[in-house]
Image (cartoon, rainbow, N blue to C red):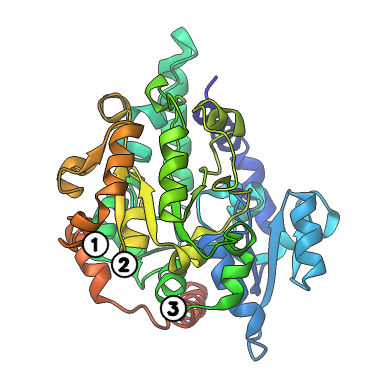
Amino acid sequence: MSPTEKRNIKRILLYFLYPVIFLLRIIPRDKNIWMFGNFKGYIDNPKYLFEYLHNDKNNDIEIYWLTRDKELYKTLKNNNREVLYYYSFKGVWKSFRAGVSFLANGYSDVNKLAAINSFIVHFWHGTPIKKIFFDTELVINFYSFGRLNGLLTRLNIKATELLNNKINIFLVSSDFELVRMKKAFRIKEKVFRITGTPRLEIIKGRANKQLKIANVFDKYNTTNGKVIVYAPSWRDKGWELKQKIDTQQKLNVYLEKENAYFFIKRHPLTSVDELLSWGLVETERVIFIEDNFDINGAYQFIDIIITDFSSVMFDYGMLNKPVLFFITDLEEYSNNRGFYDDIVEMSYSRINKDWDELLNSLEDLKKIDKINKFVKHPHFEYLLKNKFGKVREEIVALVKKEIEYAEN
């Protein structure tokens, strides 16, 4: 059973529990209790809004970060953050009392059973380039269940439609995102609000030295060298053999010559074993970044980013810095899950299909840099033009207003 199928099974079970969930509406909600979470860690849009409210001592909102991770719970507790352990009595009770729940991925970010009856605000976690939800059969279908595939797929569609249509506000950064997400989630246009998302404010905000210290670069970058980050997307069916590097010697030589450091930021759903299967070995200049690394706050301290079809290309690209494309499984992934956009065109036909091509592109980066164009897409041009200066402040005001409207 694939990780996607496991998540779909949980969604179907939630669907059958809905009569119980409906009865739980008798528990009174408090519109001033806001619940945040992210099953991938203390990262991304929910974190930034949560931190904003934590630092705003004048607000009347009771905020909580909900987590299943005991170590994260201890860390946040030690840092005086309003954190709840998912399996604690208080964590469960406050989840059912929360008037508002904030999601970045789905209901697994918080307490599923509790969140459904709250006012739900969805951020998502990037601009989708690879197909998501109802736009790709891979996410909806059950390929490991033989004859049960058809039945389970139909149930999953019903469960997903039910959950998606419980969303009260879906925040996006442009008309382009609105159209794409509306179709992928099969929800009504009236749910969407074009506000920008908190991560855009963080990315385009003023650089903060503390962010750099927190983001591990100083820990390894002992020679004040160039910071290169490789941040690929997740593969539903694992990595192709072509991702394996034949020899690391050429990479090591390049890094020494250019006084550069190669940080690998694995996707939260990519296992360490998958990463190790590429054949890379950690050295003083090749570093596997630890879990819970928040890349959005680190972009301003990165000199070059390497990605595939992740929305990293948009986020980092807003800073007018070099983006290199590295996709060893372009044809396979296109046939398997599929893309919304022509990724070759988006990259100006500069996709590196193996490690040798990637290293050659790194060597030739000065020539490419003269072009000063790395991502070709109308949404990217829109992001470049906008400053996103007070996104979090505006979202808080919007949510308060929408809650009052929903109650009346």
Q: Is residue 129 visible to us here?
A: no
Residue 229 pos. (x, y %): 45, 52
Residue named by callout 2 = 318
Q: Which amino acid is tagged 1?
A: Phe
Q: Which mark is residue 205?
A: 3
Mark 3 lies on a secondary structure that is loop
The residue lying furthest to the right in this view is 89
Q: Which amino acid is tagged 3?
A: Gly
In the rendered view, tell whether residue 326 sits above or below residue 217.
above
Q: Is residue 399 left or right of residue 186?
A: right
The residue lying furthest to the top in this view is 147
Q: Residue at x 59, y 42 (%)?
A: 283
Residue named by callout 1 = 380
Density class for disc 3 (Cα within 10 Å; few <14, some 14-19, many ≥20) is some
Structural distance between the alpha carbons of marks 2 and 3: 11 Å
Sooner in the amino-acid sequence: mark 1 or mark 3: 3
In the rendered view, tell whether residue 139 sits above or below residue 178.
above
Q: Is residue 228 left or right of residue 311?
A: right
Q: Residue at x 34, y 51 (%)?
A: 187
Residue 22 pos. (x, y %): 62, 49
Mark 2 lies on a secondary structure that is loop
Sooner in the amino-acid sequence: mark 2 or mark 1: 2
Mark 1 lies on a secondary structure that is helix
Could you tell me if the residues under marks 2 and 1 are in contact, i.e. CB atoms within 8 Å? yes
Q: Is residue 344 left or right of residue 101?
A: left
The residue closer to the viewer here, 251 or 332, is: 251
Sooner in the amino-acid sequence: mark 2 or mark 3: 3
Q: Which amino acid is tagged 2?
A: Met
Q: Which is closer to the viewer, label 2 or label 1?
A: 2
Q: Residue at x 67, y 88 (%)?
A: 57
